[in-house]
Amino acid sequence: MAPRPDVSVQRTQEVLEAAIKVFARMGFHKARMDDIAQEASVSKGVLYFYFKSKDAIIEALLKQIFSRSLHIQELLQTEGSVRDHLLDLTDTFGHEVQMMKLLLPVAFEFYSLAGRNKTVNEFVGNYYRELINSLGKLIEQGITRGELRSDLDTTQTARTIISIFEGMTLLWILEKGKFDWLDNAKNSITQFIRGIERCPYQT
């Protein structure tokens, strides 16, 4: 007999999805537990059974958004040029953007909250520090192989790549998805790679 699905897990996710809609519509500050309960079609008592406070919901969403992996560590172990890896990474990030389309406005709420909330600041900061570190290793690999210029600052280069992804995402949100994120991001990353690749005459 097949195992019965965990109803609590399903209901928790339903509550989080309802919270995403409320936060995207109203922002963290104005949203109330009553609004989330109504959106989730549950009583306030049921909502409090799953989450003790609005902050607990925000924390759960924080982990859901900023715990995603872009599989950079796996790329470091696979064959292929840094150019190929960065384009693969762009594909992965683009897929994440599409999958998390509803979550994106809430993600930017977190950026605002990070300026005044220590817990959020540390969580988001750790996410980007790990991302920069992993990308830096990928850039270092390219330098060692002679694919990229030897004078590159790996940390700054990693930050620039992340800025391309995040900046493109912000514009995509502001323009309500009216342009192809992946096509534009690939063009930008390709142009950037051309600027950091090692020319044949360089030592």
Image (cartoon, rainbow, N blue to C red):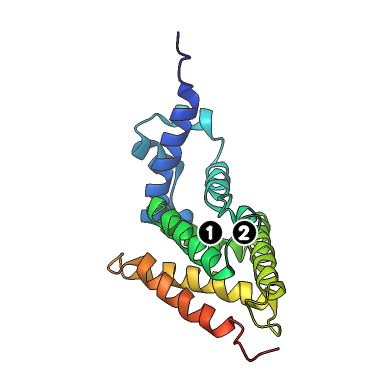
Q: Which residue lies furthest to the top in this view?
A: 1
Return the residue nearer the eye: 89 or 80: 80
Return the residue nearer the eye: 173 or 30: 173
- Taking the spot 39% from the left edge, 41% from the top edge, the residue there is 18
Kindly report the distance in space between the C-alpha atoms of the residues bearing marks 2 and 1.
8 Å
- Taking the spot 54% from the left edge, 85% from the top edge, the residue there is 195
Q: Name the residue under label 1.
A: 110
- In the rendered structure, the answer to whether residue 169 lies left or right of residue 144 reads left
In primary-sequence order, the first of circles 2 and 1 is 1
- In the rendered structure, the answer to whether residue 46 lies left or right of residue 160 reads left
Query: Which element type, helix, strand or loop, lies under badge 2?
Result: helix
- Taking the spot 53% from the left edge, 66% from the top edge, the residue there is 86
Question: Mark 2–mark 1 contact, CB under 8 Å?
Answer: yes
Image location (x, y in percent) of residue 181: 37, 66
- Taking the spot 67% from the left edge, 62% from the top edge, the residue there is 134
Q: Give amino acid for label 1.
A: Phe
- Locate the C terminus by quadrant: bottom right
Say which mark, if any, is on residue 124. 2
